[in-house]
């Protein structure tokens, strides 16, 4: 029979930390420590797998499992958890640990292996890492089922991007996305397609900037036999291939003027004319476009047709660069690590503090795509149980490449050195700004603010106190 100890109600926002230990004094002490840091916790005895089964049936959001008790039973428990509840990430806490067991635990899915006494900062860091990994594993399962309701990171602008994408998906409306290369425009286009009624039909993607102007028309609209030298047979274009589905035109800013005029006709009349033919062909494809340059500026410079611009700007989505989303860098890195580790068959437990500091200090000119490639490279070359600074590319290690900075607003990034802030202080600035804006938008109602930020009121109060947020001073 399961015993319930020191249970804190789990109906509030945020994940629950489940503490399992045969030593109830130690378990309750851990719960007290967690709750003082603003976490929701449950302390229970019994079979951990059965406890998790029961809590899952009750709808509890288990973010991490702190597992104590005898070492002899932990290996089997970890195996069962990985099979039945892979999204529940364990953290091992023991009084008598060995290197061999630590390595085995990590290989079986534990995110950390801690030896008592455990400092509060160390425990908190382990819990945050476990919660992040749990969310990433849950997100990957959602993606496989086609539900993109969860997302990596906490930047409010990206939450808005996903909300707009989900809202616009059911309609055949044209969508225009703006953002630097590598910010995820192709991913958003796929989400729109997969959440739409057209999801069973083709998703066709073409980069207008990667195809020579002389071939672009044929690629988009097709051609008939003999239309030009080398046209030995009829060929359907991308618009016809996407009929019933979605066509994604990336780098539309690179389309030459002649192509822009023909695209305008497609949008207005929903017909194409294959090269070498005068017979229009009806097409039924949902059109999503993307640009890595502001089209307003190109229109002002006479490089992009104004009528086409207003025709495609029905619903516009702007994706922020990664350098303005400092708080999302590590969640994204952890997500890519888990994803690539599965594909490559590598066992790497996480990313250490030195590598994390470098990742968060780098400017990421290639944005999310560059981060993904960096993590894959580090995973392949990793020599230890975790990714360290030595596993990162040389340009991240070179002196002066780490442009530390502080995000003081959603649109402004200032040099880190000019403020004399530590890295921790710099990383706290965007969190303070987000909390302040949430407080103001909810008239400083702490309960509503905590719910909107998906944290509990205790955590919100502690953060307000740390950042000096007071309505009287605001």
Image (tube, grey):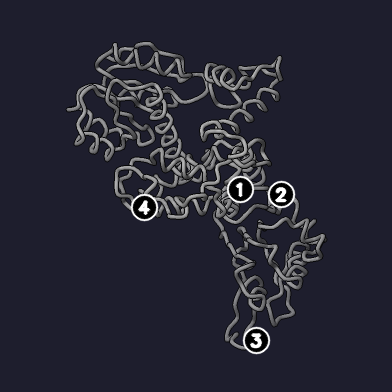
Q: Earlier in the sequence, mark 2 or mark 4?
A: 2
Identify the residue shown where x is 62% and y is 58%: 246
Q: Nearer the viewer, residue 228 or 243?
A: 228
- Looking at the rendered image, the disc whose residue lies closer to the viewer, 3 or 1, is 1
The CA span between labels 2 and 4 is: 34 Å
Mark 2 — residue? 316
Q: Earlier in the sequence, mark 1 or mark 4?
A: 1
- Looking at the rendered image, the disc whose residue lies closer to the viewer, 4 or 3, is 4
Mark 4 — residue? 343
Pointers 2 and 3 in contact (C-beta within 8 Å): no
Mark 3 — residue? 228
Dot 2: few (<14), some (14–19), or many (≥20) neighbours within 10 Å? some
The CA span between labels 4 and 3 is: 44 Å
Pointers 2 and 1 in contact (C-beta within 8 Å): no
> Quick check: 209 above or below 348?
below
Q: Nearer the viewer, residue 58 or 411?
A: 411
Question: Could one spot residue 151 in this view of the protein?
Answer: no
Q: Earlier in the sequence, mark 4 or mark 3?
A: 3
Mark 1 — residue? 321
> Quick check: 6 above or below 51?
above
Q: Residue 90 appears at what percent x and percent y? A: 33, 30
Q: Quadrant of residue 388?
A: top left
The CA span between labels 2 and 1 is: 16 Å
Q: Earlier in the sequence, mark 2 or mark 1?
A: 2
Image position of 396 (left or right of 31):
right
Image position of 189 (left or right of 276):
left
């Amino acid at each position: 029979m399961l015993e319930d100890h020191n249970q804190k109600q789990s109906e509030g926002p945020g994940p629950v930390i489940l503490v399992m230990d045969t030593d109830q004094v130690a378990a309750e002490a851990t719960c007290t420590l967690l709750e003082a840091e603003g976490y929701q916790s449950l302390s229970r005895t019994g079979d951990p797998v059965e406890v998790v089964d029961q809590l899952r049936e009750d709808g509890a959001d288990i973010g991490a499992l702190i597992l104590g008790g005898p070492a002899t039973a932990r290996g089997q428990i970890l195996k069962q958890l990985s099979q039945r509840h892979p999204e529940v990430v364990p953290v091992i806490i023991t009084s008598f640990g060995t290197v061999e067991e630590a390595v085995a635990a990590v290989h079986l899915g534990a995110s950390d292996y801690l030896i008592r006494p455990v400092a509060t900062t160390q425990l908190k860091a382990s819990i945050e890492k476990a919660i992040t990994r749990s969310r990433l594993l849950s997100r990957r399962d959602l993606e496989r089922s086609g539900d993109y309701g969860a997302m990596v990171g906490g930047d409010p602008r990206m939450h808005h991007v996903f909300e707009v994408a989900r809202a616009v998906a059911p309609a055949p409306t044209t969508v225009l996305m703006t953002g630097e290369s590598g910010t995820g425009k192709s991913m958003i286009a796929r989400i729109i397609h997969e959440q739409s009624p057209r999801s069973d039909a083709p998703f066709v993607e073409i980069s207008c900037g990667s195809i020579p102007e002389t071939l672009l028309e044929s690629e988009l609209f097709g051609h008939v036999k003999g239309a030009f030298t080398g046209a030995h047979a009829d060929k359907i274009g991308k618009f016809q291939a996407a009929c019933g589905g979605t066509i994604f035109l990336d780098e539309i800013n690179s389309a030459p003027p002649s192509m822009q005029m023909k695209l305008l006709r497609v949008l207005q009349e929903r017909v194409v004319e294959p090269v070498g033919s005068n017979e229009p062909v009806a097409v039924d494809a949902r059109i999503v476009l993307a640009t890595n340059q502001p089209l307003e500026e190109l229109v002002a410079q006479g490089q992009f047709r104004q009528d086409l611009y207003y025709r495609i700007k029905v619903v516009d989505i702007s994706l922020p660069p990664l350098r303005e989303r400092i708080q999302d860098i590590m969640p994204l890195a952890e997500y890519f690590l888990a994803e690539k580790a599965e594909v490559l068959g590598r066992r790497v437990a996480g990313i250490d503090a030195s590598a994390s500091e470098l990742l968060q200090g780098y400017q990421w000119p290639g944005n999310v795509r560059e981060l993904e490639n960096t993590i894959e490279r580090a995973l392949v070359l990793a020599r230890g149980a975790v990714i360290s600074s030595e596993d990162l590319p040389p340009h991240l290690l070179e002196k002066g490449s780490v442009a530390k900075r502080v995000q003081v607003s959603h649109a402004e990034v200032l040099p880190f050195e000019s403020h004399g802030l530590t890295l921790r202080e710099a990383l706290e600035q965007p969190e303070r700004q987000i909390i302040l804006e949430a407080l103001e938008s909810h008239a400083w109602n702490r309960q509503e603010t905590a719910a909107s930020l998906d944290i509990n009121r205790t955590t919100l109060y502690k953060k307000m106190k740390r950042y000096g947020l007071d309505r009287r001073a605001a």
